[in-house]
Image (cartoon, rainbow, N blue to C red):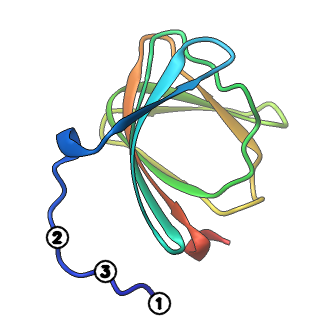
Amino acid sequence: MLNIPFQTIDWTSVAETKHPGKTGEAIWRTLEWPGLRLRLVCYSPGYLADHWCRIGHIVYCISGELITEIEHGEIFRLKKGMTYVVSDNQSVHRSRTEKGVSLFILDGKFLR
């Protein structure tokens, strides 16, 4: 059980980290507590993840469009205002975007 006191988050004050994809890049602003990670993530136009992911996430699309490929071939499009949810090891997936996308991503032990 987490014990996080009430707080507001000014995401503009959270340091950015850059993560190259196979193509394009991801800019993360990350906050972490034991067992919980919150991220504001922006993928550049033409971004393609450099790996297949097994981690569970709750992903909310703030703007743009995210294309999520499932390892067995299924494709999902997440548009502004949409969310996807997946638990660890349930659907191996990777992300890409054609025009860029901004996301709020929540992951942690509760998705195991």
Residue under label 2, please give it: 7
Q: Is residue 10 above or below residue 61?
A: below
Q: Is residue 48 above or below residue 33?
A: above
Alpha-carbon distance for marks 3 and 1? 9 Å
Compared across the picture, whether 50 is left or right of 80 comes to: right
Which residue shows up at 19% across the image and 39% down it? Answer: 12
Name the secondary structure under disc 3: loop
Residue shown at 80%/30% (left/top)?
73
Confirm or deny contact between disc 2 and disc 1 (CB under 8 A).
no
For residue 70, side relative to residue 109 (left or right): right
Q: Earlier in the sequence, mark 2 or mark 1?
A: 1
Residue 1's place in the image compared with 94, above or below, is below
Q: Residues within 10 Å of mark 3 (few under 14, many from 20)?
A: few
Which residue lies at the image location 72% right of the left edge and 43% below the top edge? 53
Disc 3 designates what residue?
4
15 or 11, which lies in front?
15
Give the residue pinned by disc 1: 1
Secondary structure under the numbered disc 2 in the rendered image: loop
